[in-house]
Amino acid sequence: MNHPFDPADDIVGYNRAAWNSQVQKRNPWTIPVSTEEIQRARNDDWQIVLTPEKPVPREWFPDFRASPIEVLCLAGSGGQQAPILAAAGANVTVFDNSEAQLAQDRTVADREGLPIKLIQGDMADLAVLGNASFDLIVHPCSNSFVPSVLPVWKEAERVMKRGANLLSGIVNPVFYLFDDQLMEKGEFKLQHKIPYSDLTSLSSEQMQALLEENEPLCFGHTLTDQLGGQIEAGLVITGLFEDGWSEWPISKYISTFIATKATKP
Ligand SMILES: C[S@@+](CC[C@H](N)C(=O)[O-])C[C@H]1O[C@@H](n2cnc3c(N)ncnc32)[C@H](O)[C@@H]1O
């Protein structure tokens, strides 16, 4: 494809700017939690989502109050999961590509007096984090913004302690099969192959429209890469549920999100 600017040259840089722009546009995944939610979390009344609607079961989390644990919110900034977990008693590090998203966590941390550590970087390279550093990783639906998910699972496994859990939100690749514009109207026309990439599957006009709007570019990974990739990285999948998003017409027919719990043996 011949675009004046080719985001494939630097997809991490392109998606960083795009997520900075999502903060300005008030994308729902960039809106920080309220003081009331933080107060409830301090009293052990809390929940978080890694997929759009269903909260992660509380039994997927260790008891933070018994002894503080090290938690990594991987590609998970935006002032949502991290401040809740910090208020609930965990020692939280947030790692994300977008400085504007990280600033949302900084805003809540300052407002609520929560000691959250913020690191900017690409989820495929966690070299700044030591081996076996974390008891828990929470990874909301973010790997649809990177072209290859296997390095993410390998890096996550490396920084996990033995017995640690990785809780991930995943987009079911079935979502990427259909013509996007028709799907928004509730019409389903098979259009794309899986694995899917905005970089190679869109027409020049569709790509130009995304670039002009500073929209993040997406990738639809196979279930082999999403689920098998966690296993290949050395983890054991010990929990799974599906979720939908009522805003998406396809959710009437199939749950297009998966949450997994994977344990490092
Ligand atoms: C849908 S938001 C997820 C965060 C949100 N709190 C949630 O609950 O879904 C996607 C996040 O992935 C981050 N992201 C995208 N590409 C990334 C990359 N290569 N490395 C790290 N973070 C990335 C974005 O900056 C954004 O904060």
Image (cartoon, helix red, strand yellow):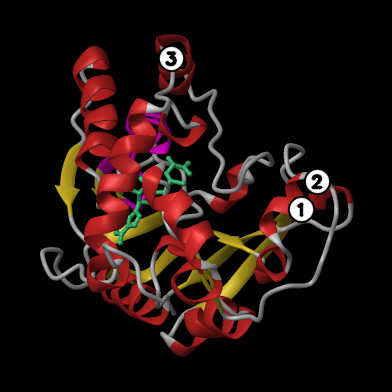
Left or right, 193 with respect to 88, comes to: right
User: Are the two marked residues, 2 and 1, in contact with CB atoms closer than 8 angstroms?
Assistant: yes
Q: Which residue is mark 3?
A: 34
Give me the C-alpha separation between circle 2 and circle 3.
29 Å
Considering the numbered disc 2 on the image, is that residue within a helix, a strand or a loop?
Answer: helix
Answer with the quarter of the image where residue 98 lies. Answer: top left
Mark 2 vs mark 3: give the one in front. 2
* Image location of residue 190, percent across then percent down: 79, 72
Residue drawn at 53 percent across, 27 percent down: 46
Residue located 49% across and 83% down the image = 229
Residue type, label 1: Met
Q: Label 3 near label 1: C-beta < 8 Å?
A: no
- Mark yes or no: residue 154 visible: yes
In screen coordinates, is 122 left or right of 170?
left
Report crowding for label 1: few under 14, some 14 to 19, many 20 or more residues within 10 A (C-alpha): some
Classed neighbour count for the residue bearing mark 3: other residues with Cα under 10 Å, few (<14), some (14–19), many (≥20): some
In front: mark 2 or mark 1?
1
Question: Which residues are drawn in magenta?
Answer: 73-92
Q: Quadrant of residue 115?
A: top left
Which residue occupies the foreground of this view, 219 or 214? 214
Q: Dot 1 corresponds to which residue?
A: 183
The disc at residue 249 is 2
Q: Amino acid at mark 3?
A: Ser
Indicate the position of residue 3 as horizontal and vertical percent values: 34, 67
